[in-house]
Amino acid sequence: MNTNTSKVLKEASFGELEKLLLKPRFPKYSAIYGLVDMHIRYNIFEGTPTMFFIPTDNNLSSLTVVYPVCERQDKAGPQMITLHWDVDNELDTDIQGYLSSLPDINWDKPVSISGTSTIVLDKIKHILESSELCGEINSMTIVYDGDIYSSEEVPLEIVAPDGYVLGQLKPEHVTYVNKMFGNPLGESDDSIRTQFTKFPGVALYKLSDDGIEDPLPVSWTAVRSNGLIGRTFTLPEYRRSGFATLVIGQLKNKILNAGFIPKLGISRSNSASIKMNEKLGFIKRERAVRAIFSSE
């Protein structure tokens, strides 16, 4: 329970979010900015459980909290939060007070926190150990440690090889993509279907001898709800053919043409992906970490 009534979060309205994007103090952490930008740009507030929380007086704090981050398939999984604030100029005790006012969250249950490395690795455990939040943290498990890359270069010249055609990743591909790529965040099929319908995506299809497009792609990638390129996958039998480079390059072009900056997250251990995307003009910008904290 929040005992500090001056530190209260409220759900931000569409209009407030539009104004926040223009504020110098609005978090420039890519995942937060991307979540807000994608919801506004593609108007996906209807039918999504994702909510954005800001302090009642957002001139006093830059804290922005996204909870829940997405609609989950597994309702029993960890509660997922993405958050950011100015760690150099705001007190931990103030952040504790704000977070304790976050509605509809059970701090006694495991919480998945996404943010910059400074927040997730250095700050949040101490903050969560407040008696108003989780109390003593018994375990912290890092489930993702990577970097966010972006590219503002001019569009690339992308041409599909003979026997293939580039197209859109389609809503009816959700089950297929989840089977092949997986679903690491446990998003619901409806949530992913909305993303495939609304957001830019690219798929490479094989053509038959008569020029008929196969119904299922051999390689694909798509923009996720946080504005980052993801779900990139090529069927094993088609790898080492440059198809991942092809679909990411084409998606980069679509994003640039849509008027926003192509960004993607790469695990620090994925050296092959790092090398490939650097060749496509992506430059490392910031570190991003997701960890699960539990008091159980």
Image (cartoon, helix red, strand yellow):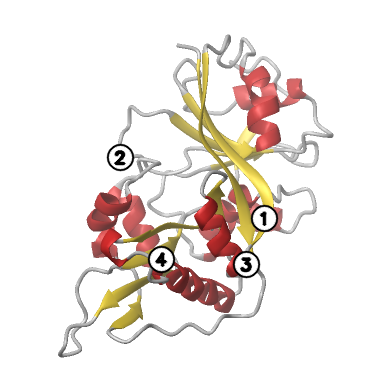
Q: CA distance from mark 2 to mark 4?
A: 20 Å
Q: Is residue 72 above or below residue 78?
A: below
Number of other residues with Cα within 10 Å of mark 2, as a class: few under 14, some 14 to 19, many 20 or more: some
Q: Which of the two discs, 4 and 3, labels the residue nearer the N terminus?
A: 4
Q: Which of the two discs, 1 and 3, labels the residue nearer the N terminus?
A: 3
Q: Which of the two discs, 2 and 3, labels the residue nearer the N terminus?
A: 2
Q: Residue at x 58, y 59 (%)?
A: 37
Q: Residue at x 80, y 41 (%)?
A: 59
Amino acid bearing label 2: Gln
Most distant residue in the bottom direction: 210
Q: Is residue 113 above or below residue 153?
A: above
- Asked if the residue at tag 2 contacts the one at tag 1, i.e. Cβ–Cβ closer than 8 Å, the answer is no
Q: Which of the two discs, 1 and 4, labels the residue nearer the N terminus?
A: 4
Q: Is residue 253 above or below residue 24?
A: below
Judge depth for marks 4 and 3 and give the one in front. Answer: 3
In the picture of the structure, the residue carrying the numbered disc 1 is 284
Amino acid bearing label 4: Lys
Amino acid bearing label 3: Ile
Amino acid bearing label 1: Lys
In the displayed structure, does residue 87 sit left or right of residue 288?
A: right
Number of other residues with Cα within 10 Å of mark 4, as a class: few under 14, some 14 to 19, many 20 or more: some
Q: CA distance from mark 1 to mark 3?
A: 14 Å
Judge depth for marks 1 and 4 and give the one in front. Answer: 1
Tell how many labels: 4
Judge depth for marks 1 and 2 and give the one in front. Answer: 1
In the picture of the structure, the residue carrying the numbered disc 3 is 261
Q: Which mark is residue 73?
A: 2
Q: CA distance from mark 4 to mark 3?
A: 17 Å
